[in-house]
Amino acid sequence: MPEKILEVQNLKVCYETGRGCVKAVDDVSLTIFEGEAFCLVGETGCGKSTLALSIPRLLPPNSRVLDGRILFKGKDLLRVDDSELQRIRGKEMAIVFQNPMTSLNPAYRVGYQVAEVPVTHLGMSWDKALTSAVNQLSKVGIPDAGIRARDYPHVYSGGMKQRSMIAMMTTCKPSLLIADEPTTALDVTIQAQILKLLHSLRVEYGLTLLLITHNFGIVAEVCDRVGVMYSGKIVEVGEVTEIFDNPLHPYTRGLIECVASRRGSKARLNQIPGSLPNPLNLPSGCRFHPRCPYTTYLCMKEEPTMTEATSNHSVACHNYKAVG
Amino acid sequence: MTRLLEDLRKKAYSVYRSEEVKLLIRHRRGVVGLALLTIIVFMALTADLIAPRRFDEVDTALRLQPPSLKHLFGTDHLGRDVFSRIVYGARIALWVGILVVLVEAGIGVTLGLISGYYSGFLDKVISAFTDMLWAFPPIILALAIVTILGPGLTNVVIAVAVVSWAPYARIVRAKTQSLVSREFVMAARAIGESDLSIMFRYILPNTLVSIIVLATLTIPSAILYTTALSFLGFGAQPPTPDWGAMLNEGKDYIFGAPWNSIFPGVFITLTALSFNLLGDALRDVLDPKLRLR
């Protein structure tokens, strides 16, 4: 059994709004093992980005962590002091954001920004750091890295910016890389290149990947294990083949069926009826029950808990046997 | 490859700003501003050499002489050479203008960064203070401060700076607030930068353009404020050749001897203009996005 690198326990995060505290992440527990690629999937607003940002404590100021623990290599990140947190960020844990367009500091040259990380964390000299920055940039596939390192970010394309971000975040060889929808803002060919890059970096550095996405194609391509989120909760966790071949939660099943395929004629695309519930006014019992084709009386009354269906597959549904 | 690395390293250090310098040279209005400013700076630096007389040399036989070859800009009501006084006055104008702007930008930028970065209580306190200052007539407050500190140019500089940092605080605060939510600031946090480093290395450089533009706008007004205080007897004491004070002294003879007021006025305008042109050029050159590649 590989070692646990990240363990999220009963995390609850809420956002302060004028109409009360909106729970974006509600009692989520999650374990990620060293070296694996874990995917969080779910539709917009289900709390996957909030979960991702809460791990390095980068949540916006109007949010609050109500409860829970985030154990990273045995340390509770919610309770370490700021200097320790600054040491961990960038050195042991890194994060790549959704929008590469604004992720680089427009006032400095790209090479300088990449070089800065090892200078801060490893005490490397600027001379050496700039050399290694150029190496790192060419490793992530920036052509003529020695020349392009002198450019300012605004002359880079979106894909190049995302590559530089990845270069910046991986110069210190962190053990965990969180990628929050890293390809959403890029076009499809660049998506594939970025995913390939992430994969090769994983192989080379042995880093663990936590990938946030809403794209099942990416899940199938990249991941070892998948967690499906719905309305602030994780509803199903399992190995990627298990999830695709044998989805046990009606929501997961619905999501997979939504993916357009060329099979069949020009029939209407499947869809899940209804939309995400209002987090200020959640339905009783199981949050998915108003949209679920398998709803029973129990679903309206009682919230399901995570149960282990098989050894590598857990699901939070009362009727998973009927679904599977 | 090694040659490229070598090149990069060189670029990163010694000639890091060479591109900017080149661009500034190509900026026509910037060159005009720079040239004007160079002339004024040159006047200030070499005043002892180029001024035909001392600024306080009185010759009552030569009162209110019109401009001639002997007295390039004429003489004033005490028979002092106006050209010499203007040359010496360049020192005061530059010193005062730059010092005031440095002090007020220092106060305003620091407070603006803090209040924009740490939203909440601190922000409320600083903003309330800025608004109060903004609502108060600056010249009256400056007068009050000079009255407390006593007359003299240094005290005038302090007074003018203390009453006029509000625009810096406001602009930097607004800029900071919009930058804080940008992803590169979050990325900076994600690579383990401290708050101080984020404020001064990520946010400040990106507000620099606005600060420079604001500074060019406030140097002339700083010169005017100190001039006004000099006129009221709080600033430069006679016989200090303050351009503003000369302008005011000359106004009593404006019909008979207009050169007494015109030349100081022209030099105040030229100084202000040179800073403005240079500021515009710097804005164009320092903003990577406005730069043509």
Image (tube, rainbow, N blue to C red):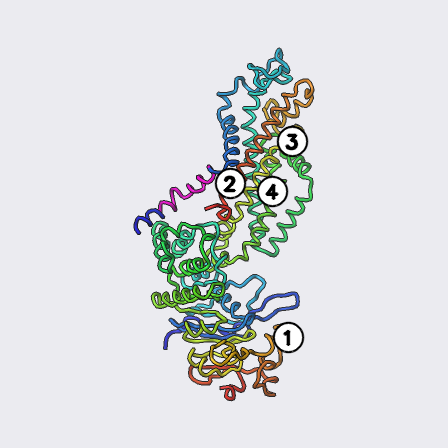
Vertical order, A182 against B45 (above or below): below
Left or right, residue B2 beside residue A321: left
Residue that numbered label 3 is attached to = B229
Q: Residues within 10 Å of mark 4 (few under 14, many from 20)?
A: many
Q: Circle 4 sits in a helix, a strand or a loop, which is it? A: loop
- The amino acid sitting under disc 3 is Leu
Determine the residue located farthest toward the left in the rendered image. Answer: B2
Task: Tell me which segment is drawn in magenta.
Answer: B9-25
Number of numbered labels in the structure image: 4
Residue A96: x %, y % from top left: 46, 63
Chain of the residue under label 2: B
The one of B88 and A155 positioned closer to us in this rendering: A155
The mark nearer the N terminus, 2 or 3, is: 3
In the rendered structure, find residue A205 and report the number of the disc placed on it: none
Chain of the residue under label 4: B
In the rendered structure, find residue B282 and report the number of the disc placed on it: 2
Magenta-highlighted stretch: main secondary structure?
helix
